[in-house]
Image (cartoon, coloured by chain):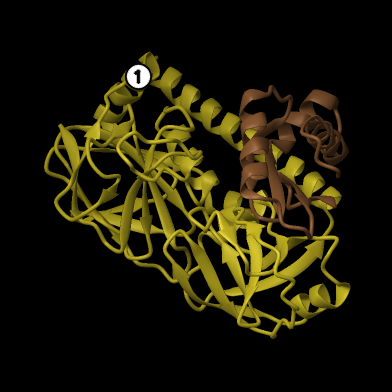
Chain colours: A brown, B yellow
Amino acid sequence: MIFANGDCHITYQQEKPISDSERARIADGFLKGTHEYLKELQTTEHTLTFLYSPVKVMEAHNTIEPCDLVIEEVRAFLGRMEVAA
Amino acid sequence: MSIIVQDSGLLTILQTLDPEPSAKGNEYNGACDRLAHQLANQLVGNDKAAPTVEMTHQHSIIKFTEPTVIAFSGAGFKAKSGGREIFLNRIYLFDRGDELEFIPQKKGNRIYLAVAGGLKTEGSNVMKSGDEIIMCRDYTAHHDELFNMMKRRSEVNWGVDTYALVEVYLSDVYHIVRRPDVPDEIYEKLESGEYTVRNEKNRVALYVDGPEIALQDTGIEHAGVKGGVHIADSQPVLALNDFNKVTTAPQVGTIPSYHLHKLSQKSTGSKIQFKAIDAADAHANLYAHHLWMKSLFKAIDYKLSKELVKEKM
């Protein structure tokens, strides 16, 4: 599942553990890729948590609901990394 | 020249606004109270992100070694210098040999001290008694004007009024953004009573006591995010800036960033009431808070430029 973890993070969570090598591959993919709003990625055995600046998204899109736009970017990134979200 | 930390109190640390990597192994995990950090810098004409001295609970005594323009911010502090009363959110000029001592107050936990022209440290950013913090002296034309004005009167008779900050710091109600995997009953329980701060592990977490939360441990490994509310021994643990990167303590939600200023000002015995909200509501509140902060900083700029113009006439 993907959800807003507070107002500045989006978290992807799965029950099945993500292996260390898989986490390293995703983290590396994040570092090498370019992102519109995603600033940082924190990985754990079950989660990928992305940091973003909600005010930046709000002002760029003239909206006070930035979540959907950022979740879309997270989904696109996970798609590129071949993570089934 | 530098400022000297005469007495380092409980924890005195040179801190940046946002987390920053450090080649010297210092931990710059960002100011816990971002509002106070920015406010102090704005008052002395610095970049809002410039490092400040963050002092926790039992505060330091600072000694000045040259004429220095300062401001400090936080939630309800006072200080003294000799026989002079010093107030928060105002600009002061101190001279060589002056000492600034903070007076403990019932409310508030952290003070942020900004020095015009900026601060840096050559060694550890955790200050011990007798340590020096180097003044960068990155003075701009605005700083020069500020110094000239302060030389004539050493303090200004205006500042950010306490009432302007009441809305940010006074309330004990803390929003918690719901998670989709946490049942409603947990939020009902969290909202059902008042929690009391048992203690703070410095900059890591606040431990609170109140209605017990019976949450089944699903074995999920969570990321430690600032404001995260985790359950350990049936009680909430609230993550601060230096919280573990990874935790197996179940997470029930996250306190939004606009309530983290006042969270970091909570001390032992303070009260906390939770109110569960959705992310959409948190974002609406965040934007309102963002606009309020912008207007506050603009008001400071306006007032300061008016004073400087008056001085030139």
Q: Quadrant of residue B95?
A: top left
Q: Residues within 10 Å of mark 1 (few under 14, many from 20)?
A: some
Q: Quadrant of residue B55?
A: bottom left
Q: Nearer the viewer, residue A46 or B265?
A: A46
B203 with respect to B237 (left or right): left
Quadrant holding the N terminus of chain B: top left
Q: Which residue is mark 1?
A: B145
Amino acid at circle 1: Glu
**Residue B100: percent from the left, percent from the top?**
24, 51
The disc numbered 1 marks a residue on which chain?
A: B
Q: Residue at x 68, y 37 (%)?
A: A26
**Residue B79: percent from the left, percent from the top?**
31, 56
What is the secondary structure assignment of the residue under circle 1?
helix
Q: Residue at x 79, y 36 (%)?
A: A78
Q: Nearer the viewer, residue A41 or B151?
A: A41
Residue B295 seen from this side? no
**Residue B206: percent from the left, percent from the top?**
53, 68
Residue B199 vs B116, above or below: the answer is below
Quadrant holding the C terminus of chain B: top left
Residue B273 seen from this side? yes
Q: Nearer the viewer, residue B3 or A2?
A: A2
Q: Residue at x 75, y 78 (%)?
A: B216
Residue B216 vs B32, above or below: the answer is below
